Image: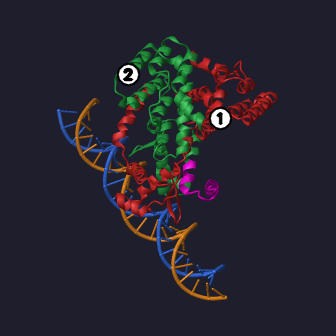
Chain colours: A red, B green, C blue, D orange
Amino acid sequence: MSLLQSDLSKDLERISTNTMADLVEIRLREYLKKKSFLPGDALPKEVELAEALGVSRNIVREALSRLRMLGMIESRKKRGMVLTRPDILGAFERVLDPLIIDKSTLQDIFELRLTLEMGMADILYIRKTAKDIEELEAIAKREVKSSTSFRIENEIEFHGKLYAITGNDTLKRFQIMLLPIFGYVTTLEKEQVKGKITHLDLVDILKHGDKEAFRNGMREHLAPHFDRLEKK
Amino acid sequence: MSLLQSDLSKDLERISTNTMADLVEIRLREYLKKKSFLPGDALPKEVELAEALGVSRNIVREALSRLRMLGMIESRKKRGMVLTRPDILGAFERVLDPLIIDKSTLQDIFELRLTLEMGMADILYIRKTAKDIEELEAIAKREVKSSTSFRIENEIEFHGKLYAITGNDTLKRFQIMLLPIFGYVTTLEKEQVKGKITHLDLVDILKHGDKEAFRNGMREHLAPHFDRLEKK
DNA sequence: TTAGTACTTATGTAGTACATATCAAATGTG
DNA sequence: CACATTTGATATGTACTACATAAGTACTAA
């Protein structure tokens, strides 16, 4: 119900609240796209943009400030503004805060994580190297010895290493981004949930088993989480 | 070399280029977090914020403009600004443009998609309903009849429906967001690549097969893409 | 040629003024 | 007394001006 209401209000805003800064932001995006600027290219000056668009410099600055935040442009004192390679996840990270995100989204994101880890087997097997496995094993072994108070850190370290092995930067950063949420969900659990398959088992599968075996192993490892999903 | 240089300059900026708007943005974030505002709560007025922070209203507005773009706050003429449920993916969408994203990130995101679709089997089997399968089958059948020129649309429709079945809004919106890239990568392909498993086959598995069968089926369906990965 | 200085310029910040939409109270009418 | 209308107050949206600051650029002197 609240979902419907929020959707409605969102739709209503779409038409009404078109602030100038929004429009200018869009126009600037189109401009950058059309002109197919290359990273490092200089943009027109703020005053020129303001004149061309017929708005005050303030407005232009608001729009530029947004693009700057997203990492799409950088600006230096005299040199003007230059287009940079946009930082895709940079913006994403900023909104992602367990304290601000509502509970259902939190749940969504947790499921996203499960999906990613279930699906990474193939790429993992394409990219993994002997050195990777070695490092992963070291992490898993360290974990057995250390006390239980560090289990979240270990958990993060192990799964983080898996993301790293994929060699996919975006994926890896995605995981880093999800860390706070990862921790948050873990603390929600009354007691430590453990699958039958441990981290060491997973390492062993990576060493001697095939993709299918790894997928099944990961499924078992994450089983407690999936069980919780099914109960809902 | 140029990479090193850009890294260096980035590090150097980290300390130097702390514009006031950046600082205010951070401060506002902390403020919102600390006060643990609930969605719908009203924020202090712009002038008050400006006075409290000791900066001009312009700066405050720049920072607020960013948060507004990210969907963290909404502001109406007289009522003031209110904290809203942040639109996690809204910001993300804005940076995500195939024309601006560099090629390696594009590749990363494509792999992200493969990972997601390989990993969604479990959640799919938890959430799927008879109605879902029915609709999915309708899509797959329609596709067989229609001409090949619509294959991208069909592809998107079918896989989109899969995301929808997961019941995970974030996941679904994620897919919508990836659509342009989806299309972009597809057009890169010289000729239509087809796995041995068709969409109809997948529907059949969803009807009568188990999770493992579906995972394997999806793997086969996406096989041409994975093959391309292995060749790299 | 090179080092150093002064000038120019574009962004960063501050402050003022007014437009506009909206809430709220006051007023008028049945 | 209740309800509709008007009026005023207020917070955001936009514009404009002014100056600070950093960073190129050109010019001068050793």
Tell me the residue at 49%/17% (across/down): B128
- Residue B145 is labelled as none
Residue at image mark 2: B144
Residue at image mark 1: A127
Residue A189 belongs to magenta span = no
Q: Is residue A42 above or below residue A127?
A: below
Residue B101 in view: yes
Residue A98 spot, x, y in % from top left: 59, 35
Residue A15 spot, x, y in % from top left: 33, 40
Residue B4 belongs to magenta span = yes
Q: Nearer the viewer, residue D27 or B148?
A: B148
Residue A20 spot, x, y in % from top left: 37, 51
Q: Which residue type carries mark 1?
A: Arg
**CA distance for labels 2 and 1:** 36 Å
Residue B187 in which image quadrant: top left
In what quadrant of the picture does the C terminus of chain B appear? top right
Residue A98 in view: no
Q: Residues within 10 Å of mark 2 (few under 14, many from 20)?
A: some
SS for callout 2: helix
Q: Is residue A100 above or below residue B30?
A: above
In what quadrant of the picture does the N terminus of chain B appear? bottom right
- The magenta segment is B1-27
- Looking at this view, name the residue that lies furthest to the right: A145
Q: Nearer the viewer, residue A54 or B83?
A: A54
Residue A132 spot, x, y in % from top left: 72, 35
Q: Which residue type carries mark 2?
A: Val
Q: In the rendered view, does A67 fall on the left or right side of B36?
A: left
Q: Nearer the viewer, residue B54 or A152?
A: A152
Tell me the residue at 47%/30% (across/down): B193
- Looking at this view, name the residue that lies furthest to the top: B208
